[in-house]
Image (spheres, rainbow, N blue to C red):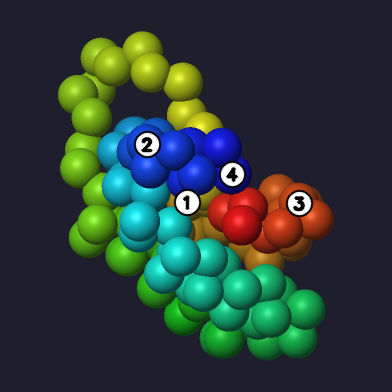
Amino acid sequence: MAAEARGCPVIVRLMGEGQLDVAADELSSLNTLDDELEAAIESGDETLFRAALHALLDNVRKVGKPLPADSLAPSELILPPADAHIDEVRSMLGDEGLIPD
């Protein structure tokens, strides 16, 4: 990801919650959680999927700095809401998951 290479923060949108400014050096840990989410989706295990999704979203909330609600900054990454269905998240996955390497 270009922003990560430059060390620039990344704007992440959590659907239904808002945007957070995440430091580029946090993306590696988020990618690990994204990989776990992908594996859970591939397994079709709803319990595993739910735990992996919540772990990813919780970590973004932990490391990210919320942007003001009226911010017009474009989101570089969009993550599903915590109550998303496994099929919804599966349809959002790209070749590199929700968070590209």
Quarter of the figure with the N terminus:
top right
Q: CA distance from mark 2 to mark 3?
A: 22 Å
Decide which of 6, 52 is in the foreground and name it. Answer: 6
Q: Earlier in the sequence, mark 4 or mark 3?
A: 4
Quadrant of the rendered image containing residue 13: top left
What's under tag 3, amino acid-wise? Gly
Q: CA distance from mark 4 to mark 2?
A: 10 Å
- Badge 2: few (under 14), some or many (20 or more) residues near its Cα, within 10 Å? some
Q: Is residue 90 left or right of residue 76?
A: right
Asked if 84 appears above or below 66 in the picture, the reply is below
Can residue 76 be seen at all in this image of the molecule?
yes
User: In the rendered structure, are the residues bearing label 4 and label 1 in contact, judged by CB atoms less than 8 Å apart?
Assistant: no
Residue at 24% x, 22% y: name it: 69
| Residue at numbered disc 3 | 94
Q: CA distance from mark 2 to mark 1?
A: 25 Å
Can residue 89 be seen at all in this image of the molecule?
no
| Residue at numbered disc 4 | 1
Quadrant of the rendered image containing residue 99: bottom right
User: In the rendered structure, are the residues bearing label 3 and label 1 in contact, judged by CB atoms less than 8 Å apart?
Assistant: no
What's under tag 1, amino acid-wise? Pro
Q: Callout 1: helix, strand or loop?
A: loop
Q: Callout 2: helix, strand or loop?
A: loop
Asked if 80 appears above or below 85 in the picture, the reply is above
Q: Please provide percent x and percent y for residue 19.
A: 34, 34
| Residue at numbered disc 1 | 81
Q: Callout 4: helix, strand or loop?
A: loop
Q: CA distance from mark 4 to mark 3?
A: 14 Å
| Residue at numbered disc 2 | 8
User: In the rendered structure, are the residues bearing label 4 and label 2 in contact, judged by CB atoms less than 8 Å apart?
Assistant: no
Q: Earlier in the sequence, mark 3 or mark 1?
A: 1
In this view, the mark in front (2 or 1): 2
